[in-house]
Amino acid sequence: MTGRLLCLVAALLLAACADVGMRPYARPSVPAKAAWANSASLPLSKTELIVPDWWHEFRDPYLDQLVSRALAGNFDLAVLAARIGVANAQIGEARAGALPTLDAGAGASFQKVTGQPFTKQFNLATQTNWDIDIWGKVEKGVQAQKAEFSATEAEWRAGYLKLVSDVSTTYFQILQFDEQIDQQRQTLARNRDILTTYQAMEQNGLIPHTRVLQQSAEVNRLSTELIELQRLRALAGNALATLIGVPAGDFQMPAGRLQERVRVPEVPGGLPSQLLKRRPDVVAAEYRVLEAYDLTGQAKLAQLPSISLTGRGGTSSFALSTLLKSFTFGLLPSINFPILDPGVKARVRTSEAQTKVAEQAYRQTVMAAFEDVENALVNLEAHKKQRGELQQQVDQLRLVASTTDAQRKEGVASQLEVFETERTLLGAQLALLANQQQVLSDTVTLYKALGGGWPPVEVADAAQH
C-alpha cells in the first residue's frame, strides 16, 4: 500500500511540473508602416472605406451582370464554399471528443461436443466510456477548429475578391480587343485603298515598284495582326466563360467599346492598420496562427492526468426467454498519468514549431499585401499621368492629320504625307486605348489590394485564454 501511495504522489508531482502555461494570444509583430509612400496622391480621404460592391463604381450594367453570374456559377468559388462546410462539420467532430460514447452488442454461441449435449448461449452487453475534459483539452481543440473554420471562410472571401477582379480585368481586355479589332479593320481597309492608289501611281510612273511592294507587305502585316487580335479575343472570351461557370465556347460576349462603356472611378484609400484587418488573405493567415496557438495549448494540456469513466452492463442466458431476467452492471473510474510518454512531449514541440511557421507565413502575407498596395498605387498614378500625355499626343496628331488633309486638297501636301500622318495618329490612338485598359485594371487591382470592401476582423477577439 505504501509503495502505491508513493507512486501516486510521484505521478502527481510529475504532472505538476508539466509546462502547460500559455501566453495570451497576440497578433504576430510585423514591420511598422504608418502610411503609403504616395498617400498624398490618393483621390479621397483615407478614412473612407471601399464599398462591398465596388465593381458598380465602373457604371457598367453588363459588368454587373457578369459578376453576378460568376458569383453564382464559378466552380473555384464553389470549392471554397464547400471547404467551409467541411470546416464547420469538423467543429462538431472536435466537440464530440468531450461527450460519452455508448456501445451495445448482442451475440450467441452454439456448441456441440461428442458425447455431450448440444449447448447454446445468448448474451447482451453495453459499455459506456467518458473521458472527462477536466483541463479543457478538448475545448482547446474545438477553439482550434473554430479558427480553422474562420480561416477557411476568409479564404472564401479572398477567392470571392479574386474572382470579381479576374472577371473585371478579363472583361476590360475583351472590350479593348474589340476596339482594337475595329480600328485594325479600318486601318486595313485604309491601307488597301493606299495600295490601290500606289498601284495607280506606279502605272503613271510617279512612284517606283518597290513602294508598291512595301505597301503590299504592310497590308500583309496588318492582316496578320488582325488575325492575332481575333485569336486573343477568343481566348479571353473562353477565360471569361470559365470564370462565370459556362463551358468555353458556349458563351459569346457582344462586342463593345472600352472607352465609351466603362467609367474610371476614384478609389478610396485606407490606412495600413485597416489593411491588416480587411484583406481576406491576411485575416486567413492570422486565423492560422490562432489555430496553431490553440493546438499548442491542447498539446500542453495533454501532459496532465486524464480521468475516464467506464460503465459496463450485460446479461447472459442459455435461453432467449430468460435473457432479460438478470443483469450485471459495473463502473470503472480510472486516472491516467502520462509520466513517460515521449509522444506527448514530441507533440508539444511539434505544435510550437508549427506555430512559428504560421507566424512567419502571416508576416510573409502582410509584407506581400503592403507590396500589392504600393505597386497598385505606383502603377495607377503613373498610368494616369501617361494618359494625360497620350491624350495630348492624340489631340495634336489629330490636328496635324486634319491640317495635312486640308493642305492636300489645296495641292500643298501629297497623299503620301496624309497617309503617314493618319498612320501616326492611329498608333497614338491605340496607345491611348491600351492605357485606358491599364488604368481600369490598375483600379481593380487597387480595390483588391485594399481588401475589396470586406469589413475589418479582429482575430484576437476569437481567442480564449
Image: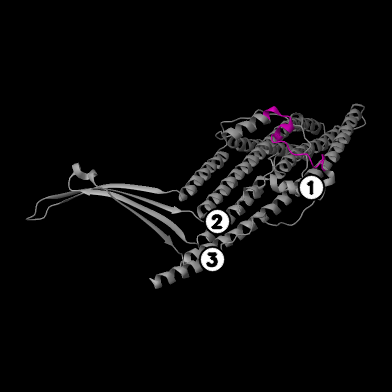
* Secondary structure beneath label 3: loop
Q: Which mark is residue 391?
A: none
Circle nearer the N terminus (2, 3) = 3
Determine the CA span between mark 2 and mark 3: 17 Å
Circle nearer the N terminus (1, 2) = 2
Viewer-proximal residue among 178 and 162:
162
- Split into 4 quadrants, where in the image is the N terminus? bottom left
Q: Is residue 208 visible?
A: no
Magenta run includes residue 54? yes
Viewer-proximal residue among 379 and 227:
379
Determine the CA span between mark 1 and mark 2: 41 Å
Q: Looking at this view, name the residue that lies furthest to the left.
A: 115
Residue type for callout 3: Ala
Q: Quadrant of residue 331?
A: bottom left
Residue 338 coordinates in the image, percent (x, y): 46, 64
Tell me if 454 is positioned left or right of 45 in this view: left
Q: Which residue is drawn at the image coordinates 58% and 33% (left, top)?
A: 72
Q: Which residue does the numbered mark 2 point to in the structure image? A: 295
Residue 264 coordinates in the image, percent (x, y): 77, 35
Residue type for callout 1: Val
Circle nearer the N terminus (1, 3) = 3
Q: Which residue does the numbered mark 1 point to in the structure image? A: 378
What's the magenta bit mostly, secondary-structure-wise? loop
Determine the CA span between mark 1 and mark 3: 53 Å
Residue 128 coordinates in the image, percent (x, y): 37, 50
Q: Which residue does the numbered mark 3 point to in the structure image? A: 18
Q: Quadrant of residue 419?
A: top right
